């Protein structure tokens, strides 16, 4: 397949640990010519295997605050003690290359994007259950007990939020089935 007919940027959202990253990485691997990822800025440190400029732009809290002050973000939010933001310039640059930009954004960021007036498509990735989400978070091996509790509490809010206002909701129960549903929506089939 080539590019989707609808080339508006795609906002993908859902609770931490639901498999958003796995799903859109599959989309990129199977259609490398069609998509590009909007790399967000964050003040958190990289997890094992993550790279600056590939997974995130890792910046200090001071650098992040300066970017906010300069109105450089389409959206930005705080989660725990860390900040995350999507650069307006990144979206423009990537769209200009002719690829569909995919943005992985949490709930507060989605609210800001909706208020921006920019035209996006929205997909929410849901877990099959709270227990499965907790299992996935624990399986990462990168979260503290406090972080897991915080992410699960936040997930309850996000799941309510994900019930409305999204163009598509995909339940990531079985990976390949969820991927096919996501791909079908992206390509309009």
Image (cartoon, rainbow, N blue to C red):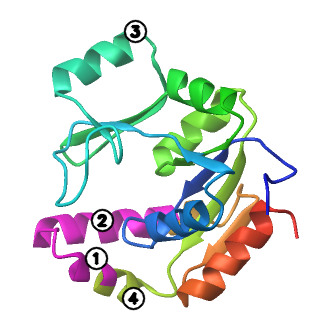
Q: Compared with residue 158, is residue 117 higher up or lower down, i.e. above or below?
A: above
Give the overall secondary structure of the magenta segment. Answer: helix
| Residue on which disc 3 sits | 70
**Residue at the (81%, 54%) spot, across then down:** 4
How busy is the neighbourhood of tag 1: few (under 14 within 10 Å), some, or many (20 plus)?
many
Residue 180's disc is none
Secondary structure beneath dot 3 equals loop
Residue 29 x %, y % = 55, 65
Query: Which of the two labelled residues, at mark 4 and mark 2, occupies the earlier sequence position?
Result: 4
Residue 137's disc is 1
Residue 174 x %, y % = 55, 90
Query: Is 25 on the left-hand or right-hand side of 164?
Result: left
Label 1, label 2: how far apart the Cα atoms are: 9 Å
| Residue on which disc 4 sits | 132
Query: Which of the two labelled residues, at mark 1 and mark 2, occupies the earlier sequence position?
Result: 1
Label 3, label 1: how far apart the Cα atoms are: 35 Å
Secondary structure beneath dot 4 equals helix
Residue 169 x %, y % = 68, 70
How busy is the neighbourhood of tag 4: few (under 14 within 10 Å), some, or many (20 plus)?
some
Residue 151's disc is 2
Query: Is 37 on the left-hand or right-hand side of 144?
Result: right
How busy is the neighbourhood of tag 3: few (under 14 within 10 Å), some, or many (20 plus)?
few
């Amino acid at each position: 397949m080539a590019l989707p007919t609808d080339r508006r940027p795609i906002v993908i959202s859902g609770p931490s640990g639901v498999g958003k990253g796995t799903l859109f990485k599959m989309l990129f691997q199977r259609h490398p010519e069609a998509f590009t990822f909007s790399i967000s800025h964050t003040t958190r440190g990289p997890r094992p295997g993550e790279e600056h400029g590939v997974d995130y732009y890792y910046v200090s809290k001071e650098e992040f605050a300066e970017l906010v002050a300069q109105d450089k973000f389409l959206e930005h939010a705080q989660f725990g003690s860390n900040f995350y933001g999507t650069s307006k310039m990144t979206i423009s640059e990537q769209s200009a290359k002719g690829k569909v930009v995919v943005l992985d954004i949490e709930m507060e960021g989605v609210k800001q994007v909706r208020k921006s007036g920019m035209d996006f498509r929205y997909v929410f990735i849901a877990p099959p259950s709270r227990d499965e989400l907790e299992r996935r978070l624990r399986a990462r091996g990168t979260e503290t007990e406090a972080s897991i509790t915080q992410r699960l509490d936040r997930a309850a809010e996000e799941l309510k939020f994900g019930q409305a206002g999204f163009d598509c909701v995909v339940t990531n129960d079985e990976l390949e089935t969820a991927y096919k549903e996501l791909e079908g929506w992206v390509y309009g089939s």
